[in-house]
Amino acid sequence: MSLGPFGVAIAVAFLLVGLAYLVGSGRGPRPGREVPPNLQPFLTDEDLETSRLNKTLTAALFSSAFLAIALPLYFLSESGRQADFTEMFEEEAVHVGELIFLEQSAENPEGFGCIACHGAEGVGGGVDFTEPRTGARVTWQAPPLNLVLYLFDESEVRYWLTWGRPRTRMPALGVEAGGPLNEQQLDFVIDYLESIQISQEEALSAVNGIVDAELASLEAAPAVIDGAIAAQTGELAAIISGPDRAQWAEDLEANLRQVLEGADSGPDRDLDGLSDDSEIQINRISELAFANVGTDATPATASAANRLIVQIDPGNPFSTSGQTGDAIPDQQAAEELLRELRAQIAALRPLAANNEVLLETAETALANLESTRAEERYAVDFNDLAERAFDGNLATAQRAYGLYSGYCGRCHTAGYSAGPVGALEPGSGGLGPSLRNGRSVVQFPDAEDHYEFVLNGSVNGQPYGVTGIGRGWMPGFGAILSEADLRLIVEFERSLQ
Ligand code: HEC
Ligand code: HEC
């Protein structure tokens, strides 16, 4: 449909009227309306552009420049600030972990005394332990912790901290196992352990020292066991004589008290309040005590024998102290002897009371030590080993044994951590399975798989070898032993019959 000329004329007329209205309404004040302030006449530009305006503009320029520079700078250092904060938190965590590692004391109520067993900064140490197999009192090695994170990953270390090592002195420390340390405290301890790890070069370069120490220890083993037998024999003698010595101590103590009660009657040449007669009697008591009460046999009373000697001269008011060797008045020497006898009574009473049990334990321990000495089960025939596994090379066979002992013995040789006194045949099995009777050849028919396993260790829940199921207890040694040394160890293990 088209509009036609008339329609077009009307449309144009409307358009013109509309435009005229728009133009008219934009212009000038209309009657009855106030003029808005921005349209009212004001100061001229000349009046406005004073020095005040310049100052204001300059100030605005500077503050914009400041913002333009400062904001990006602030933003740039933001990530650094977060890193600093994380670092501060980590330092604090390491510090709290260290407090847990140290001994408990008034200043350090957090302490759990790892240091007492594992040594300062985790270099390794030893702890008293009654070896269950032999009943012998031994020093059990607590492994170094300054390379533990090369052997185990964090979750595996956390496992040992939580659950400890049953049947050893390593306590279960995690709340989950009924211990005192919560998850966060365990984190702190692990942070501390991380902070004390030695460098990988250091760990690798310790190898020769470790091998030499193992070979020296093997050489010294008979002498060490002889020493242990002598100590155990002495302990046994002390236990056997315990009841008699307790009786002597009690009788002599009663005698001495009586003498001291009547000591001021009769002639007294040295005028010290002890009559000549009393002084002679005290000397006699001292001699009897020395001969019958004291013994160097038990460590607990080792130096006590000397303390029982009091020699009082009726012509001299001074005697020599049995305890310090100083000159002391006779009266004081007599009292020292009395105190010493009472200390002996206190020490000997339990020995007398539990005599049968103690005797049996000590006898078993001695018998075990003697059979260890006679059988020398820890010993290795290097010539035979060299022939069987190392092309007749004696030095290589010795190195292989040293490596195995130094790195694997503590978990794969029974009693290894007690030293020669407790160690059985290499590979006899401890925390880790026995490797004797060609066991590792059965588990790993291919030596390469055996090598891979020792390189990486076990993973909890993951099968290995032919029948193995890992618990994550077997460390991986790839980070701290060279390939050549690992291969020697594998060869050694595969030769165990
Ligand atoms: C009373 C002594 C004692 C105390 C205290 C002690 N440990 Fe132990 N710990 C041991 C002994 C011993 C072993 C090794 C047991 C064995 O022969 O298998 C051990 C093993 C470990 C292991 C396993 C390491 C490995 O290579 O096999 C870790 C990790 C460990 N301890 C950490 C700690 C920490 C951390 C503390 C303190 C919170 C601590 N221990 C307190 C004696 C102790
Ligand atoms: C901290 C203790 C520990 C040390 C140290 C250790 N092992 Fe083990 N090993 C184990 C345990 C435990 C197993 C069993 C696997 C598991 O429980 O995860 C095992 C398993 C093995 C097995 C497989 C045996 C089988 O028949 O299943 C071999 C082989 C082995 N270890 C070799 C070594 C060698 C080689 C070293 C030294 C370089 C070594 N181990 C050091 C604890 C240890």
Image: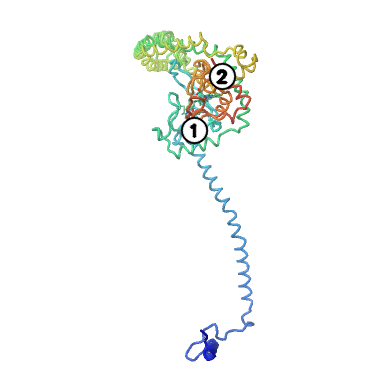
Position above or below: 79 against 170: below
Q: Which residue is mark 2?
A: 494
Q: Quadrant of residue 248?
A: top left
Relative to 69, say whether 348 is above or below.
above
Judged left or right of residue 60, residue 160 is: left
Checking the image for residue 430, the label placed there is: none
Give how far apart the Cα atoms at labels 2 and 1 are: 27 Å
User: Residue at 49% across / 31% down in the picture?
Assistant: 462
Q: Residue 173 location, x and y as percent?
A: 43, 32
Find residue 156 and name its label. Answer: 1
Q: Residue 461, image x and y in percent?
A: 47, 31
Identify the image's colour scheme: rainbow, by chain, secondary structure or one colour.
Answer: rainbow
Disc 2 packing (10 Å; few <14; some 14–19; many ≥20): many
Q: Residue at x 45, y 36 (%)?
A: 110
Is 260 positioned to the left or the right of 30 in the image?
left
Apparent side of residue 370 relative to residue 45 in the rendered image (left or right): left
Give me the residue at 55% from left, 50% from top.
Answer: 82
Task: Report x, y in % for residue 468.
Answer: 48, 26
Could you tell which of marks 2 and 1 lies nearer the N-terminus? 1
| Amino acid, disc 1 | Glu
Q: Secondary structure at mark 2?
A: helix
**Which element carries disc 1, helix, strand or loop?**
helix
- Residue 254 in which image quadrant: top left
